[in-house]
């Protein structure tokens, strides 16, 4: 079968890498892809922002399956549009993608189905939002309702910061219409974990739990980023927690979406806080996480193409999704100097051919006119190492990361440290 992947990040390279191992897959395309996907897929030059053009391509070339990576496409209704044209596509419809594209919708949904999450109120008036903050006190979390590329959330430990966040979102409109509605949320304390699940509308099959490192600096300092590294599985996610998450969160979410008439087909990503009073939803994402995917898919033993097809046909069977046992994966993100602020692009990347024992998933890379791999984004490369335990995986990742470089390359030195501390 011919498969087209929409997106250009490390997540999409990891999906392409895994699909490339499938005996079912004869040809891979990426729109637009990056220098990494170019090694295993054909990167398309069509404008990937014009969904009609991608669908035209899929139709003309008899693409058997299109996989949508980024949330923006899902929120726009890419899946609905492909379905309308009779083109097979993996991902949730626009209505189901509401779990991520509107935090207010997600909150209402969780309230309706009794899914544990932080207490919250939704506001369209900044003064009312501030009154509520005065009432509840700090710490408090201020969130934009709409998509803001992961940056629309402020955890405020004092009222000034909380008020400023409300003004930035609602008056200055730093994220445009995404901030017309804000959610003021109870601050949750605990460890964060990401649980992704394949979903066919009826059934959800969880992947190994992962932990992300969202802040730019070691020790979780500095501004939030798209994610600076991950590892999976995490022992923070005990078997008891796993049972509770499945029973209290994952199953009711899938059943609730079905009851709403908007069954969830695709990858559901639970952003969880493991609090003293049990796991709670921090956020839903309606797609593979980045960089969670880079550590989770290398642990998948089964054929990813088959899993996608089973999701589309509503025949997903937990027994047929198998994972590598006794293996831990660590991903360290190499970023451009200055990220998540301003950074330079076009810098040559050295040493990629020296990597033998790790996986390198490209993110912000491209081929320049000489055919050399150069930087093209904030997060540039994901170095993924598999080990028999977390220690081996960390050591291997950092050892191999030293073999590659570009001017100003930055990475966190403490990916997986929390897990090491926990198991010590
Ligand atoms: P989100 O985009 O909703 O995942 O939020 C970004 C980050 O803000 C999360 O990964 C958490 O670290 C933090 N955060 C969000 N909501 C809460 C909350 N209710 N309590 C504590 N931290 C939160
Ligand atoms: N790593 C978090 C996300 O993909 O949103």
Image (tube, helix red, strand yellow):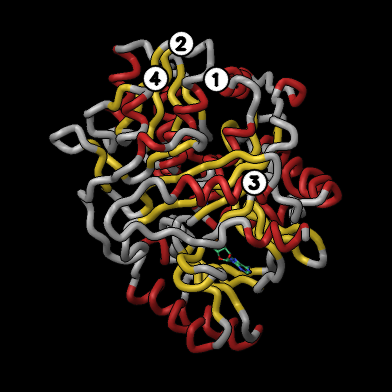
Judged by depth in the image, the label closer to the viewer, 2 or 3, is: 3
Q: Earlier in the sequence, mark 2 or mark 3?
A: 2
- SS at badge 3: helix
Q: Earlier in the sequence, mark 1 or mark 2?
A: 2
Q: Earlier in the sequence, mark 4 or mark 1?
A: 4
Q: Which residue is mark 1?
A: 305
Disc 1 to disc 2, C-alpha distance? 9 Å
Mark 1 nearby-residue class (10 Å; few <14, some 14–19, many ≥20): many
- SS at badge 4: strand
CB-based contact (under 8 Å), mark 2 and mark 3: no
Q: Which residue is mark 4?
A: 28
Q: Which residue is mark 3?
A: 392
CB-based contact (under 8 Å), mark 2 and mark 4: no
Rendered image quadrant of residue 79: top left
Whether residue 17 is situated above or below residue 240 in the rendered picture: above
Mark 2 nearby-residue class (10 Å; few <14, some 14–19, many ≥20): some
């Amino acid at each position: 079968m011919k498969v087209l992947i929409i997106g250009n990040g490390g997540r999409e390279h990891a999906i392409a890498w895994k699909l490339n191992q499938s005996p079912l897959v004869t040809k891979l395309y990426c729109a637009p892809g990056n220098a990494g996907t170019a090694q295993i897929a054909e990167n398309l030059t069509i404008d990937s922002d014009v969904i009609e053009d991608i669908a035209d391509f899929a139709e003309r070339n008899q693409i058997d399956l299109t996989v949508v990576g980024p949330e923006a496409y899902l929120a726009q209704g890419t899946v609905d549009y492909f379905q309308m044209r009779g083109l097979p596509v993996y991902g949730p419809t626009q209505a189901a993608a509401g779990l991520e594209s509107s935090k207010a919708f997600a909150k209402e949904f969780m309230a309706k189905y009794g899914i544990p999450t932080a207490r919250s109120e939704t506001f369209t008036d900044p003064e009312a939002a501030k009154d509520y903050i005065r009432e509840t006190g700090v710490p408090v979390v201020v969130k934009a309702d709409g998509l803001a590329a992961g940056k629309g959330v402020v955890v405020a430990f004092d009222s000034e910061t909380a008020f400023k966040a409300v003004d930035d979102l609602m008056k200055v409109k730093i994220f445009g219409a995404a901030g017309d509605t804000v959610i003021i949320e109870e601050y949750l304390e605990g460890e964060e974990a990401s649980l992704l699940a394949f979903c066919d509308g009826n059934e959800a099959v969880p992947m190994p739990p992962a932990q992300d490192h969202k802040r730019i600096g070691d020790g979780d300092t500095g501004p939030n980023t798209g994610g600076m590294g991950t590892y999976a599985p995490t022992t923070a996610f005990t078997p008891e927690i796993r049972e509770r998450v499945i029973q209290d969160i994952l199953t009711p979410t899938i059943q609730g979406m079905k009851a709403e008439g908007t069954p969830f087909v695709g990858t559901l990503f639970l952003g969880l806080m493991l609090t003293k009073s049990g796991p709670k939803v921090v956020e839903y994402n309606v797609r593979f996480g980045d960089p969670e995917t880079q550590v989770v898919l290398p642990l998948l033993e089964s054929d990813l193409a088959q899993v996608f097809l089973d999701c589309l046909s509503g025949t997903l069977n937990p027994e047929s999704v198998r994972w590598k046992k006794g293996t831990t994966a660590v991903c360290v993100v190499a970023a451009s100097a200055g990220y998540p602020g301003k950074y330079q692009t076009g810098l040559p990347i050295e040493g990629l051919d020296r990597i033998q024992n790790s996986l390198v998933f490209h993110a912000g890379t491209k081929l320049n006119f000489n055919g050399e791999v150069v930087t093209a984004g904030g997060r540039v490369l994901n170095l993924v190492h598999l080990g028999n335990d977390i220690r081996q995986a960390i050591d291997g990742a950092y050892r191999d990361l030293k073999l590659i470089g570009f001017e100003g390359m930055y990475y966190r030195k403490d990916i997986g440290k929390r897990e090491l501390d926990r198991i010590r």
